[in-house]
Image: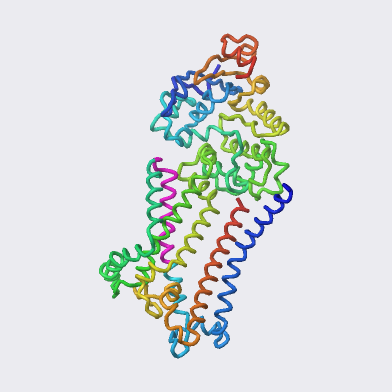
């Protein structure tokens, strides 16, 4: 009887693992099947490289959405990643312990704020700031609802996740590595640069990967401030229309238009593939750095 | 007898307790000194004071002075990085830096400003040979240091420490994580190195102290109880604490 229960328990665990493994596969497969009707009518390359979006006429050009998604993500991460890295280094290597404890609660609060609240804050603070201050400073015209506003809100939203993980990474590096480096005559900064950052490199990369994935998928807050205009943004002060916003704004409406739902499914599939691509790239880099350490 | 290190009234306290209660000792030059005592007696803390790694532990409060030659390492205006290069450090467990075998040994040299690749290569070979590791790694110097066995890693750490041409070698229970063969290799190395270096070894193993020491400092509960030659201490202990330690080991 005990043997039977023993074998049964491992079977359950295997089923659980397979279920988790199959989930992304099933989601991906579902998206592929659903986007097939559009792909049978138009070539994938054509859809990806066209910038004409006119569903009523059957034109589904995804380029503006892809460009917006990438721009918002790149700018957001370019703002948040260095900010997080520097804060994490300071908090774990220089700051007194109480500050780290205090920051943990700040991070928890930031992470707990609902997306829609960030969106409202973006509309009230960031959009006017971009429209009235930043754009004039760079001699540009902007309503404020722009790629930059989306990126700024997004940057703030990714901070708690990336920062939290980076703090974890740096705290896990044994103090003996620092002792070794200092005892060899390195200054404290040299020790951080040559030993702490290097020792934590794979962790830093996964934190960045997490941040980018998070930024790519964030929907509501970005949709509220980014403007949602289908166009090829000429500057960061122009409005954009990222893929998640496209899906969220239109799914459920206008389903009578032929191929519309199929097009939105393709948008979801694209997003899915982009996120997977970044994850795999991050994994690959992590693998590579752990091998060379 | 010339002293390499002179410690004067050194007190270290954390928030909860006084860890070192006023240490006054002199470490003889070019001899092997063993710091002996049970776990928790303050040996490691004393050790961290010698090259001021106490800086990494803001919760510790340090008073008193540690003279390395003429220089007090705790003097606020002291150039700590230079003084630290005078001391090689070997920890309980090896902590190879996250880089290749070659770069681990070259690290201290590069910090000293050695940039010439040929000189670096020569010196790395010299110190790896001194640490008795050269033959095992000469064909894979660019491999990650973490690929070595623990015993090899510890010898790599020794080579790395020797590379800054220190005057003093500090070893904190350097064999406690090693197998008997690697331990023997390290011990033999120390006996060889004391010709040219002042070696200080922390241990709680009585037999190791007997095997290695020219001079023994016995610590208990944050204080130096007795010090002298191993013969004096082990054959004729003056205090009850040391007598008990020799008999039962704590």
Please indicate whether residue A5 sits to the left or right of residue A212 in the image.
right
Q: Quadrant of residue A283?
A: bottom right
Q: Is residue A86 magenta?
A: yes
Q: How is the image coloured?
A: rainbow
Could you say which is closer to the camera, residue A27 or residue B167?
Answer: A27
* Extreme residue toward the front, this view: A1
Most common SS among magenta residues: helix
Q: Is residue A95 magenta?
A: yes
Q: Quadrant of residue B2?
A: top right
Q: How many marks?
A: 0
Could you say which is closer to the camera, residue B186 or residue B193?
Answer: B186
* Extreme residue toward the bottom, this view: A57
Residue A56, placed above or below residue B30: below
Could you say which is closer to the camera, residue A95 or residue A154?
Answer: A154
Residue B224 x/y as whole percent: 52, 17
Residue A292 x/y as whole percent: 62, 53
Residue A132 x/y as whole percent: 25, 69
Range of residues picked out in magenta:
A74-97
Residue A182 x/y as whole percent: 50, 39
Q: Quadrant of residue A245?
A: bottom left
| Residue located 50% across and 76% down the image | A267
Could you say which is closer to the camera, residue B52 or residue A56?
Answer: A56
């Amino acid at each position: 009887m005990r043997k039977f229960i023993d074998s049964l328990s491992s079977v359950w665990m295997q089923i659980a693992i397979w279920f988790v493994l199959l989930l992304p596969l099933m989601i991906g497969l579902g998206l592929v099947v659903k986007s097939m009707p559009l792909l049978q009518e138009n070539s994938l390359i054509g859809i990806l490289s066209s910038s004409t979006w006119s569903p009523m006429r059957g034109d589904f050009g995804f380029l503006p959405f892809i460009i917006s998604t990438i721009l918002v993500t790149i700018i957001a991460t370019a703002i948040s990643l260095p900010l997080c890295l520097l804060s994490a280094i300071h908090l774990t290597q220089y700051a007194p312990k109480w500050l780290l404890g205090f920051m943990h609660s700040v991070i928890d609060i930031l992470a707990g704020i609902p997306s829609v609240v960030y969106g409202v804050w973006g509309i009230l603070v960031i959009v006017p700031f971009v429209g009235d201050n930043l754009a004039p400073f760079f001699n540009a015209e902007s309503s404020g609802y722009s790629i930059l506003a989306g990126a700024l809100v997004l940057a703030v939203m990714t901070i708690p996740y990336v920062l939290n993980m980076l703090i974890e990474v740096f705290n896990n590096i044994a103090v003996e590595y620092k002792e070794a480096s200092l005892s060899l005559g390195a200054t404290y900064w040299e020790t951080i640069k040559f030993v702490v950052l290097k020792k934590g490199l794979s962790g830093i990369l996964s934190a960045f990967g997490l941040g980018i994935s998070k930024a790519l998928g964030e929907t509501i807050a970005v949709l509220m401030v980014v403007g949602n205009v289908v166009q090829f943004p000429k500057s960061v002060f122009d409005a954009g229309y990222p893929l998640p916003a496209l899906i969220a704004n239109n799914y459920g409406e206008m389903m009578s238009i032929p191929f519309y739902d199929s097009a939105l499914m393709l948008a979801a599939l694209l997003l899915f593939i982009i996120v997977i691509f970044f994850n795999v790239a991050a994994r690959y880099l992590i693998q590579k750095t752990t091998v060379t350490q | 007898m010339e002293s390499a290190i002179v410690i004067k009234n050194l007190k270290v306290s954390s928030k909860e307790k006084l860890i070192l209660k006023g240490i006054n000792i002199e470490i003889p030059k070019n001899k092997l000194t063993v710091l002996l005592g049970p776990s928790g007696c303050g040996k490691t803390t004393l050790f961290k004071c010698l090259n001021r790694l106490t800086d990494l532990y803001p919760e510790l409060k340090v008073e008193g002075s540690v003279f390395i030659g003429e220089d007090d390492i705790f003097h606020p205006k002291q150039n700590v990085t230079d003084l630290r290069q005078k001391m090689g450090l070997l920890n309980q467990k090896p902590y190879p830096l996250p880089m290749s075998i070659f770069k681990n040994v070259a690290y201290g040299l590069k910090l000293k400003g050695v940039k010439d690749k040929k000189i670096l290569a020569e010196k790395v070979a010299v110190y790896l040979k001194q640490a008795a590791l050269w033959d095992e790694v000469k064909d894979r110097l660019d491999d990650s240091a973490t690929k070595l066995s623990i015993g090899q890693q510890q010898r790599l750490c020794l080579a790395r420490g020797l590379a800054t041409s220190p005057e003093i070698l500090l070893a904190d229970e350097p064999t406690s994580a090693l197998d008997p063969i690697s331990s023997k290799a390290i011990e033999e190395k120390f006996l060889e190195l004391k010709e040219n270096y002042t070696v200080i070894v922390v241990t709680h193993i009585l037999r190791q102290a007997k095997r290695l020491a020219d001079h023994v400092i016995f610590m208990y509960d944050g204080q130096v109880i007795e010090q002298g030659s191993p013969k004096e201490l082990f054959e004729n202990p003056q205090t009850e604490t040391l007598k008990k330690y020799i008999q039962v080991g704590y």
